[in-house]
Image: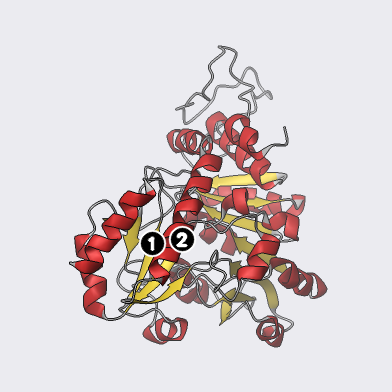
Amino acid sequence: MKNFNTVCVHGSHDSNNNTGAITVPIYQSATFAHPAFGKSTGYDYSRLQNPTKECAEITVANLEGAKHALAFSSGMAAMASLMELFCIGDEIIASEDLYGGSIRLFDNISAKNGVKIHFVNTSNLDDIKALINENTKAIFIETPTNPMMRVTDIKAVSAISKLHKLLLIVDNTFLTPYFQKPLLLNADIVLHSATKYLGGHNDTLAGFLVLNDDKIAEKLKYIHKTTGACLSPFDSFLIIRGIKTLAIRMQRQAENALTIAKWLENQPSITEVFYVGLESHPDYEISKIQASGFGAMISFRTENVELAYKILENTKIIQFAESLGGVETLITYPLTQTHADVPAEKLEKNGINNCLLRLSVGIEDIDDLISDLAYAISC
């Protein structure tokens, strides 16, 4: 099975089920009986493994072209578990423009645990090189970044990480394996908030770590079972169901996003539009090389804060809500929502101010979405 669309629909076969059920069953069991002393069905306790969760993991691994995938109860649970790979005194170089929850974890939990994070514009390779020292253990990047849509050259950063024997970790939430496969670009670990596009319907929380290295996978599995932030059977079912339509959703959402981004560029009251699919975007060319599409996330800046508030208050179809990646178009105010806990100096440095809005474009009719934005702008 090589075609991505087919893998989405048939990514994992439930080998435990002989009923002919088309849909993977929800094995809503915390524990499993042993056939005899010293024997196991392969499942003992759902914190260790569950058949529904296993199918979700196999599906995501197949989509990323990976050997291993581990499913967690949220994207942040996956990230927190990932950070357990590191010890006191270790240092990590990270994209300075990151999801606010990632920055919150780095600035507070990781710092408390003695892991030092250096934030830098990872689009600039020289900035990365300048921070590498004997304590550096990993490079962590989002590409595109949240919310300023900066792009990092994954292959180029991988070459740096390999030279210095560092792990390269890529948050692939925005583009998903439909548009970008970091492991094929020589990344070591891929992170997903599956709450977003993989689930696709704003109805569940989930996270994944995806990789090929057997030794690191064993370490993460040990952390996974020990800390216990595993994905539940029902949420695993929802992720499997969501992934079945991933390809067609991503294609429609990206088409809608490009149309909206171009429309926003022509609005006099919108001063800047950040979408990697625009030829005016500084990272457009590298995006074309390392990804097969540009995704459906747009950030834009209004001419004043009053207009930003007006848009948030007056869209009817587009809903003012956090999160992203669902079939519904959502508009977010990063300053007080996704990045509310980010220190003021970091916000200012990254251009996140009171005129910045972030749009997660859904699958609605494009004319309705543009009409909704036009109405909100003109109110």
Which residue is at a point 65% across and 81% down the rendered structure image? 124
Q: Give the side of residue 112 with respect to residue 139, left or right.
A: left
Do we see residue 330 in this rendering? yes
What amino acid is at disc 2? Met
Determine the CA span between mark 1 and mark 2: 6 Å
Note whether 99 is above or below 323 in the view shown. Answer: below
Residue 302: percent from the left, percent from the top?
A: 32, 76
The numbered disc on residue 297 is: 2
In the image shown, does 70 or 324 lie closer to the viewer?
324
Which residue is at a point 53% across and 34% down the rendered structure image? 244
Which residue is at a point 39% across and 67% down the rendered structure image? 264
In the image shown, does 252 or 244 lie closer to the viewer?
252
Quadrant (top left/top right/bottom left/bottom right) for the C terminus = bottom left
In the image shown, does 179 or 60 lie closer to the viewer?
179
Residue position for label 1: 359
Do we see residue 165 in this rendering? no
Marks 1,2: beta carbons within 8 A: yes
Note whether 315 is above or below 281 in the view shown. Answer: above
Which quadrant of the figure has residue 265? bottom left
Count numbered badges in the picture. 2
In the image shown, does 357 or 271 lie closer to the viewer?
271
Residue 118: percent from the left, percent from the top?
A: 58, 81
Residue 108: percent from the left, percent from the top?
A: 45, 74
Colour convention: secondary structure
Which residue is at a point 69% across and 25% down the rendered structure image? 38
Would you call the spot at circle 2 few (<14 residues within 10 Å), some (14-19), or many (20 or more)? many
Whichever of labels 1 and 2 marks the residue nearer the N terminus, that label is 2
